[in-house]
Image (tube, coloured by chain):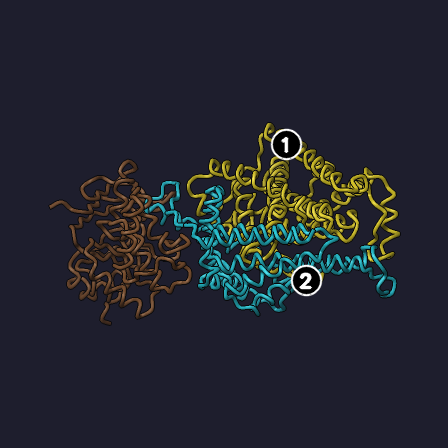
Amino acid sequence: MHMPDALISPAVAVPAIAASGAALVFACRRAARELDDRKIPLMGVLGAFVFAAQMINLPLVVIPGVSWHLIGAVLMVSLLGPYSSFVVMTAVLAIQALLLGDGGLLALGCNVLNMGIISCFLGYGIYSAIGSWAGGVRGRTLAAIAAAVVSSTAAAVAAAIEIHLSGRNPVSLFSAVWLMGSVHFLFGIGEGALTVAVLAFILRLRPVAVQDDARVHPAAMRRFVLGGLVVSLLLGGVASWWASSSPDGLEHAAVVFKWPEGESAFGGLMQPVENALASVPFLANAVIGLITTALAFAVSLMLSGLAVRRSAASKAA
Amino acid sequence: MQHIVSVNALGYSYHDGTAALRGISLQITVGERVAIIGPNGAGKTTLLLHLNGILQPTAGTIEICGRKLDRASIAELRPKVGVVFQNADDQLFMPTVFDDVAFGPLNMGLPPDEVKRRVSAALSDVGLAGFERKAPYHLSGGEKKAIAIATVLSMSPEILVLDEPTGSLDHRARRRLIRLLAQLPHTLITATHDLRMVMDVCGRVIILDGGKVAADGRTSDILLDAKLLESHGLESPDS
Amino acid sequence: MHHAYVDRLSGMSSPMHRLDPRTKIICTLAFCGVAVSVPADRLALLAWCAPPLIAALAVSRLPLVYFLKRCLLLSPFVATVLVLFPFTQHSGTELARVGPLVVYSGGLLMSVGLAARFLCTVLAALILACTTPFAALLRALEGFRIPRLFIMVLSFLYRYLFVLVDESDRMRRARDSRSPRPGGAATLRATPGMVGMLFIRTYDRSERVYSAMLARGFDGAVRTLDELHFHFADAAVLIGFAAYFIAAFIIAR
């Protein structure tokens, strides 16, 4: 999901760089206080681990020939907490951009926003919320999968939005969001399952490595939710401002906040589907998204052998 | 004569209670070159890690240069004891050789000019002058081991402690290392399986077995006593 | 491995290699900024980006073939977008019909523009990576006041990257040689253990590195000697670079 420079316009890249830079400075200060002196070699070497782990290709058994790989953000978060894992993931992204050309240098701001800030902080929020609510090994399992699915999808959706705001989106925002979102939703399930399996392995052999802060203080949770709300409002505000500051401002605003019926993907092939979905108001689409997410959680729960008889879906989504 | 290293009834147990070292006492004088040998699990590495305070004893004391080694004196005594670990890759963690060799002196608070001087001197001592700009992961096993020693030499220690120095080296690198160790003026303490190296470099041998000192004497006495060696899981170097 | 090759190239020597890393970083970022700022309706202006790239490649004495090969490697992302634009961007004239799909000239132009931008930015970043040793890049970041902790994490990451990738390669080969059919469920089953083992080894290694750091007097603060110096060549490059693009801007109006 690393985006090259070519897909991002300066109007999107610059604020993203500013936001990511600020987050990095803030996270470095917090990380410095969280862990002890060991953190420098630990975080650095773990960064190399994430890099190396991402190179281990896993077969997508359902589709032969296609491979995916662990991203590692949720694993890092469960081991290091949000701030330190954000610093580590940012370092990994930076080196990938420079050495592998995986992601552009200017686009690093956006990539860090998606795969660093969203993956680590949103992932951590979900992980600790569900972990403390459900408790124990099962809680951690559910928490990891939920964190991976939600953060993976959210990061992909953010990427789609960024490309669209840059004017480099060949399809409608709607199509882009659904394409990216659905694919990474599936990847998120795989990531969550793999993270859980690796965590179980680590807990057996090096339990000291795992930070057991799946228990979150209620006050901290409230702060997190409030913070999340503020951030979302800010992002929405910035997005609409940028969209409206371009010459055809009204048209862009309409594109961002209403489902468009304009360009169709593959001329006519998807048109009927899109028209049907587009004619449904925004709220209905959101509900459809929630229900799909809920279904996925239910499937994950069954897969991991849990029989939690609660209304997990509405709370988690 | 004051001993440079004095270990008195040293004991160390892990968190789960298993004892790794029991009642170890030994005195080392300035300029001595001592080899600590023994079967695997005897506690050789554990003992070495006590010498610069990385591990704290659960019983007994250690004195370095006449001062007791404890939490208060660690900062002052650590630069005097240069420990070279088994795996050179773990010791060369900076981006360039210069940075690695300069790490110790910089932590000692020395001024930049002095640091640069010490780096050049240390690299010359190990025969790798001019390697400053190289990256550690590109070096050969022997070069890495030499640089690892340089990283410790630059702190001008009084005692050099080496854990399995010839471990993963090929024949040529091993010979070069032995030549280097033979000419260094420091007090030397080395834990090793390489008994031939011990014969070339060290004048005194201590056998450690089951966390206790089993023998302590001249190299010529101990290494030629095949029965003694065998009873502690060691093989005579001439066999 | 690709990163190993980049690392080797960055250790070579050329006038480009000798420039201060800060100069190169500033120029690369500015260049990428220009390449992505060219408005969509004036893509011909991207041609102005070619001469500096060619000059940089020539001066840096880097192997051309390798560079061209790297640029042809498109991420699935970019490839998808490139392919879609001619069909979905309904502007300009109709160029062709492929069954129910129509190719538009406007869309094709956008694809070409995208590809050109991609080429420029990827080449620029690659030249930077291949002419600047990583240690020098870290010093430059220090100069740009990037947080110390982050720079140290980058440093350790890079240092142990090669070691860990080797370890993971070995594990991967072992896993593949023991699977009845590569790409099957057996491969999937072996992976958590592999990744877990890699983690354990990494964690233990970090403990040993920490001990080694303590043994050399580490007290929480990592100190390095500042070694970067700006030379006349750096000033010349920066001024020349700026002048070139200002001139291009004026001429293009």
Q: Position of residue B139 (x, y in %)?
A: 38, 63
Amino acid type assigned to the residue bearing label 2 in the image: Val
Q: Residue furthest top?
A: A219
Q: In the rendered structure, the residue with mark 1 lies on which chain? A: A
Query: What residue would you read off at disc 1?
Result: A227
Question: 10 Å neighbourhood of mark 2: few (<14), some, or many (≥20)?
Answer: few
Height in image: A238 above or below C118?
above
Residue A66 got which mark? Answer: 2
SS class, disc 1: helix
Front in this rendered view, residue C212 or B8: C212
SS class, disc 2: loop
Identify the residue at image location x=52%, y=40%.
A211
Quadrant of the image occupied by residue A220 = top right
Regarding residue C170, the answer to whether it shows in the image is: no
Q: Colour of chain B?
A: brown
Q: In the rendered structure, the residue with mark 2 lies on which chain? A: A
Front in this rendered view, residue A126 or B153: B153
Question: 10 Å neighbourhood of mark 1: few (<14), some, or many (≥20)?
Answer: few
Task: Give the mark nearer the N terminus: 2 vs 1.
Answer: 2
Amino acid type assigned to the residue bearing label 1 in the image: Gly
Residue A237 lies left or right of residue C214; in this view the side is right
Q: Position of residue B179 (x, y in %)?
A: 23, 65
Q: Position of residue B89 (x, y in %)?
A: 39, 57
Identify the residue at image location x=65%, y=32%.
A225
Q: Position of residue A86 (x, y in %)?
A: 56, 43
Q: Colour of chain C?
A: cyan
Query: Chain in yellow?
Result: A
